[in-house]
Image: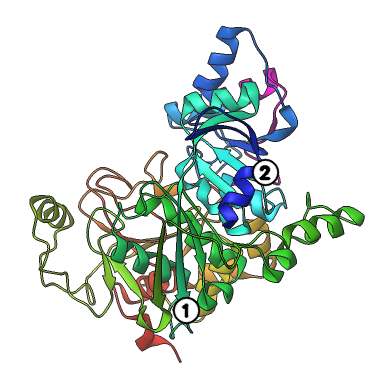
Amino acid sequence: MTLFEKIWNAHVVKSIDKNRDVVYIDKHLIHEVTSPQAFDGLRSRGIGIFRKDRILATADHNVPTINQHLPIQEPLSRLQVEKLHENCKQFDVELYGLGHQYQGIVHVIGPELGITLPGMTIVCGDSHTSTHGAFGNIAFGIGTSQVEQVMATQCLILEKSKTMRINVEGTLGKGVGAKDIILFIISRLSAAGGTGYFVEYAGSAIRSLSMEARMTICNMSIEMGARGGMIAPDETTFEYIKGRKFAPSGEKWEAAVDYWKTLYSDNDAVFDAEFTYDAQDITPMVTYGTNPGMGMGISEHIPSENTTESTLKSLNYMGLHVGETLAGKRIQNVFIGSCTNSRIEDLRQVADYVKGKQKAPHVKVYIVPGSKQVEIQAKKEGLDKIFEAAGFELREPGCSACLGMNEDKIPSGEYCVSTSNRNFEGRQGQGARTILTGPLMAAAAAIEGKIVDIREYLN
């Protein structure tokens, strides 16, 4: 069996027909945006939550990233966060709200607290739940009606996905990281290439990555249309989990690791689709359009092969044209954060690069940690001082400028080099132009005031 099939079969409560199963959900993560209607549904039915111990709530999407100790100014954001507090109190759900030591982006706090473990099924009313698959589990986003279903039954009726394996073999080049790997893959397969599949990432290049880097890759599986992404757990996984707040300990730890070591795709497992890429072919990536599949290496030019109406519309929105290179493109904003690249490893990488340097005068830089724990750690290590000296603004935890749902929006017509996961029209604010990159490329753009090839700036 494949890893996906092993975990799926272990969670089937009963089969409905050839294509559909009732699947048990181990962990349900909720936030303020997709939970209010679900709670209302429970109230209207006069029922409670079936397994409160399996649900964890946090506030992340709508929260401001400055002055979190003060009342939220934006009316809709304030209402949604207040509703989350009211609902969690009424239904006795654990909540890490603003000011809580564990508050943060839902896909950052699960792993860092040892809540996300191999072999689990994890859902959240958020498409980037696939992040948790980096630990070797089945994790995916669900709609609001399904949020209500899980609250009421701790199960979902699901159609089993097809399986795809993507192998990345070899050694990554200088200045190339996890974000470049996944943007490269999506550029090759397209924003719809994974539709209907659950993707397992494998190969020597994947195995060499840290857990933070693996999370970045699984996070963006959804951007090629996949249901989710996963990576088989190994010693890197176990070492990351060990000793974390809610991770198993003592005899339970030993038993857990024994089970986790069985979670891999068998040698004779058959995938519905399989692709293999050479790590040496991957260079620092940038996007040039309005979906993550419109990406290219920094030394490449916007391709001329595809000049469909939608492509030309996308380029027009971005203020770009066929044949253009993005190297040297002047930018006005840099956003380092989101559930894709806001972990302590990302912040360390940026701080290491910008230490002793100064941002370009015309560029505004937000660095938004993914959780309170990341923020605390960054300050403990003095990263905040490095950012401050470089002219970067270190903010408080939240989704921030990833999605333009809070106060952190990019002005219309301006470019933002962003470590987030989506570059849709208006994603970061009405008329905002988003260029996706990894943290190192974003840091270099902030310093130079333009998009540059990071490889030319590394010793």
Relative to residue 73, is residue 232 drawn left or right? Answer: right
Relative to residue 289, is residue 203 drawn left or right? Answer: right
Type of amino acid under label 1: Glu
Q: According to the image, label 1 marks what residue?
A: 169
| Residue closest to the far right | 251
Q: Is residue 218 above or below residue 128?
A: below
Q: Is 92 included in the stretch rendered in magenta? A: yes
**Position in image of residue 305 (x %, y %):** 11, 67
**Position in image of residue 453 (x %, y %):** 32, 80
Q: Residue at x 86, y 55 (%)?
A: 249
Closest to the camera, between mark 1 and mark 2, is 2
Relative to residue 124, is residue 168 drawn left or right? Answer: left
Q: Is residue 31 visible?
A: yes
**Position in image of residue 180 (x %, y %):** 40, 70
Type of amino acid under label 2: Ala
**Quarter of image, res 447:** bottom left
Q: Residue at x 18, y 57 (%)?
A: 318
Q: Secondary structure at mark 2?
A: helix
Sequence-wise, which precedes: disc 1 or disc 2? Answer: 2
Q: Secondary structure at mark 1?
A: strand
Magenta span of residues? 83-105
Q: According to the image, label 2 marks what residue?
A: 10
- Disc 1 crowd, CA 10 A, few/some/many (<14, 14-19, 20+): some
